[in-house]
Amino acid sequence: MDTRRLLRTFAIGIGTAGLLISGCSGSGSSPNASATGTAAPEGLTAYYTQKLSWRDCGVEGFECTTMKAPRDYDKPDDGDIELAVSRKKATGPGKRIGSLLVNPGGPGGSAIGYLQGYAALGYPAPVRARYDMVAIDPRGVARSEPVECLTGKEMDAFTQVDQTPDDDAEVRKLTAAFEKFAAGCEKRSGEILPYVSTVDTARDMDVLRALLGDEKLHYVGASYGTFLGATYADLFPQRAGRLVLDGAMDPSLKAIDMNRDQTAGFEGAFQSFAADCVKQPDCPLGTTNTADAATALKQLFTDLDAKPIPTGDDRELTESLATTGVIAAMYDEAAWPQLREALEGAQRSDGSGLLSLADSYYEREPNGKYANLMFANAAVNCLDLPPAFDGPDAVEKAVPDFEKASPVFGRGFAWASLNCAYWPTKATGTPHRTEAKGAAPIVVVGTTRDPATPYTWSEALADQLSSGTLLTYEGDGHTAYGRGSDCIDTAINTYLLEGTPPADGKKCT
C-alpha cells in the first residue's frame, strides 16, 4: 500500500496492536463556549492572542509554525506545551471560506503528515481552492512533544508477543509485556501523560481557530478524528462550523463494548475479503466458500503460533505479526490483492509479505525505528476511558463473547484489550452521550462494512448530535470521503463549499 493510501485510510488503534480504541473523555474544565473570534476564555488570553510566525516547511507549498497551549487547562499558569501546525493556503479561484482543519485519526496519527501527504494534495480541487488546508499534530503526537515508550528493538519484541495465550506462562508473558510498555511510557514521557486527552486536544483546536482568525472551526475528521471533532462541537457548539465526521465513533460506549463491536467489524471485513478471495484463481485460502477460508486462516495462525516462519529479516513472522498484517489489509479493499499474495507466501514459509503489512500498520521504518503512533495511541486511549478489563481473569470470562463476535480474531482482540489495565495514569474520561446542542448541522459519514468503526457507531453518533445528519456509504473499507464514491464526495463537497448538508439518511453506493 502506498503512503497516500495508508494516510487516507488511517485508522484508530485496534485490538491486535494491544491498544484500545478511544472513547469519550470528560477531562478538563469547561471553557467559556460563548467566546467567538479571538476572544479568550477566562485565564487563557495569552494563548488566544499569541502571534504565529509562519515559515517555510521544506515541503513545497506548505508553511509551518508552532503554537503554545497550557499543559494543564485547569492550571494554565503551570507551564506550556508546544504544538506543531502546518497549512497550505487556498489556491483559488473563488472567495476563501476560511481554514479547514483535518485529522486522520489514530489516536496518534500525524495530522501534519496526513495534510502534507494527502489532504492538501488529494482533497477535491474546489475544496482546496477555497480553504486554507490546515493541520495540527495533537499533543503527544509526532511533532507535538511526542509520547515515547520503547526503543525500536523493544517495540519489535512487543509486537511479537503472543496475544492468544494458551497457558498461565503465556498469560504472564503477555501481561509483563503490557507492564513494560506502560512503564516505558511513564519513564520517558510521564510528565505529559496526564495531559493528552481528547478534551485537551479539542481545546487546543479552539486556540488554533482563534489564532487563524476564524469565527468558526471547519473540520474534516476521520475515524478517531470523528471523536475529536464531536468533542470539539460539544465543548464549543457556537464555534462549530462545517464539520465532517467520517467513520464515526460512538462516545457513549464503554471500552469493552467498543472493543467487542470492533472485533465484529473486522470479522465482517474478513468475510467480505474471503467472499472475494474464493472467487479468485490465486486465493490461498481455497476457492470454495468463506467458511473454508476462515478455517484456513485460523489454521495458518495456529501453525505460526506453534512455529514462526522466516521473513528475510532478523525477525520471524509470529502469529501476532501475521494477525496484524491481515488486519492492516482490512482497512481498504484495494489492499486485498496484496494480502492474497502475502498469505500465499506465508503458506510457503515466506513471511515477508505479512511482515511488510504489519510494519506499515505500526509505522515501522526499514531501519527499525518506529513512529510514535502506537505510543500516543495508548496514551490517549487509556486516558479517555477506564480500561476494558482489570486483569487476566476478566479477559478469560469475556473471551467467549469476543470469539462469538469473531471466530477468527476474537481471542486475540480480547487479550489485546487488557493493555490499559496497567497504565500509569488514571483515566479522566467516561462514556457519555455527545449532543453539541446549538451547533450548526454536522455531517456524520458511515460505511456499512467498515471494520474499524462499525456502521452502528455512525448511526449512534448522528442520533446523539442534536444537529447530526447521517450520510451512508454502502460498501467496504474504512471511511468514505475521497475513496471513489462520486455520490459521497459530491454531498460532502456541497456541504463544505455551500454549507448545505445532505438529507439525513442519504445513501450512496
Image (cartoon, grey):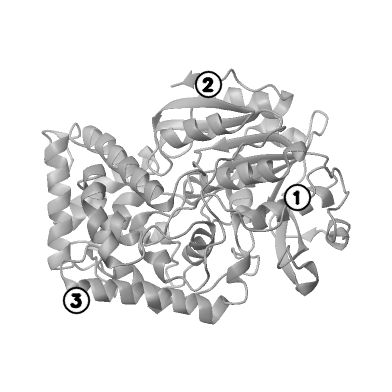
How far is mark 2 from mark 3, CA to CA? Answer: 53 Å
Amino acid of disc 3: Ala
Q: Position of residue 79 (x, y in %)?
A: 76, 73
Spatial CA span between label 1 and label 3: 48 Å
Secondary-structure class at tag 3? helix
Q: Which residue is mark 2?
A: 487
Which mark is in front, 2 or 1?
1
Q: Say whether marks 2 and 1 touch (CB < 8 Å).
A: no
Mark 2 and mark 1: span between their CA atoms? Answer: 31 Å
Q: In the picture provided, is 394 more to the left or to the right than 235?
A: left
Q: Earlier along the polypeptide chain: callout 2 or callout 3?
A: 3
Q: Is residue 157 visible?
A: no
Would you name the residue on which mark 3 appears?
Answer: 169
Q: Quadrant of the C terminus?
A: top left
Q: Residue furthest bottom?
A: 187
Question: Which residue type does callout 1 highlight?
Answer: Asp
The amino acid marked with disc number 2 is: Cys
**Horizontal arrangement in the rendering, residue 59 relative to residue 482 (left or right):** right
Residue at 15% over, 55% down: 300
